[in-house]
Image (tube, rainbow, N blue to C red):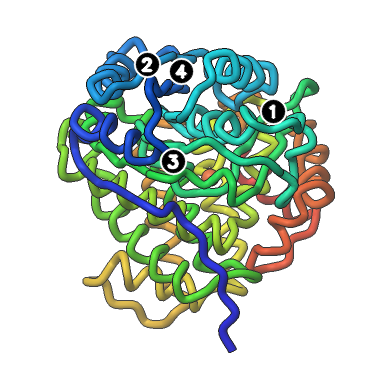
Amino acid sequence: MLNIEFLTAPKIICQSDGLRNQLGKLAMSLLPLPIDKPVALIITDPGITKCGYTERAANSLRTSGFTVATFDRVQADPPYSIVEDAIELGRSISANIVIGLGGGSSIDTAKVVSLAINSTQSLDEMVGMNQATGQPLPLIAIPTTAGTGSEVTLVSVLTNEIGEKKAIYSPKLMPDIALLDASLTLGMPRHVTAAPALDAMVHCVEAYTSRTKKNPISDALAIKGLQLLTQNYMTVLEDGSNLAARENMLLGSSLAGMAFVNASVAAVHALSYPLGSKFHIPHGHSNALVMGPVFRFNIEAASDYYAELARAILPNDEFVDNFSAAHTFVDTLENFLDQSGLATRLSDLGVTDIDILPMATEVTQKISRLIDTNPRDMTTKDVEQIYRSVL
Ligand SMILES: [Fe+2]
């Protein structure tokens, strides 16, 4: 018997140059009542402001009658203090709508700000599953990288005062509109494109093999997402200005986001988290580093699923059996990392042998919920071996 609950953003718009042409009108459409002088708060990072996208968003909003305030101090792995500053700004200007513009960190921050402005809860009180109360402000999420899928997910990951990653899961975090404007992703350098793209591929694979919440809706999204991502990956790496390929990558990463937030990610993400929190390796890169050995470890339990994915992304290949298809599948993804221009060994990024046992212990003891969804059981020893294989 099916028992599926599937949540995603109510409206998804894919339109190149939508930021310039649509944002103001979309924002106005979300206001619950006509407001005399509506105020929009744009949450972004300094890089996005520098390349002119913040001003482009502000112009579109002003043209539609908004007064616009900008908070462009978002950092990677958003610290509580920065998020609290953004919330304070939103309260002080009585914002009516929040716009998240940027990579996953900006959108994660914007999601929490939209929820917290009218809430009495602290960030710590919101952490966890469905702990958040209060009424969120309308929210539009506009990704500038193809990867995290944060524009269609109900989770925000922040970093507390002592450097721990804290996740808030709540349907109240779901953006009202995800605006996919691929023109914003044009021209990014090779490795900046590659890391989030590999993260999105991992989202598809881990959703498709999730032991607890895999379902036919997430499966369909994971397969289509992985096809779009793998078919366009080398094109965007080699020609960053190819708009059609960029559109496919952005759509693929959103499909991946829809799949994983409903089906869960698994061990790749679990092993990736300590690499992010201890060594500040960006999320997409840390996933990419461990995906090959984790997937190879999983073949014993998930060869049929990997074979299905292999046939979806390599339709012209012939395989003698599912086991060989699964190996080809993992090799194909690993080859994408080799082509990325990113470092491929943990030791290149400051990790030493002495770090491995504490990280492995953290994975199996503190991030066990993501080990539970992995298709094959994983012990601390297994995790150590996987880390060591890419040291
Ligand atoms: Fe991810």
Q: Amino acid at mark 1?
A: Thr
Per the rendering, the mark at residue 67 is 2
Could you tell whether 219 is left or right of 249 in the image?
right
The reply to whether the C-beta atoms of the residues labelled 3 and 2 are less than 8 Å apart is: no
Compared to residue 161, the image places residue 186 above or below, namely below
| Residue 198 figure quarter | top left
Compared to residue 169, the image places residue 263 above or below, namely below
Residue 272: image location, x then y, percent:
62, 41
Q: Amino acid at mark 4?
A: Asp
On the rendered image, what quadrant is the C terminus found in?
top right
Mark earlier in primary sequence (4, 1): 4
What is the spatial separation of the Cα atoms under label 4 and label 3, in whole angstroms? 28 Å
**Front residue (pair 169, 202):** 169
What is the spatial separation of the Cα atoms under label 4 and label 1, in whole angstroms? 16 Å
Residue 266: image location, x then y, percent:
62, 57
For mark 4, give the secondary structure. Answer: loop
Residue at 57%, 39% in the rendered image: 136
Residue 344: image location, x then y, percent:
49, 36
Nearer mark to the viewer, of 2 and 4: 2
Q: Amino acid at mark 2?
A: Thr
Mark earlier in primary sequence (3, 1): 3
For mark 1, what is the residue? Answer: 159
Per the rendering, the mark at residue 32 is 3
Mark earlier in primary sequence (4, 3): 3
Per the rendering, the mark at residue 45 is 4
Residue 228: image location, x then y, percent:
28, 55
Mark earlier in primary sequence (2, 4): 4
Mark earlier in primary sequence (3, 2): 3
For mark 1, give the secondary structure. Answer: strand
What is the spatial separation of the Cα atoms under label 3 and label 1, in whole angstroms? 32 Å
Residue at 57%, 43% in the rendered image: 173
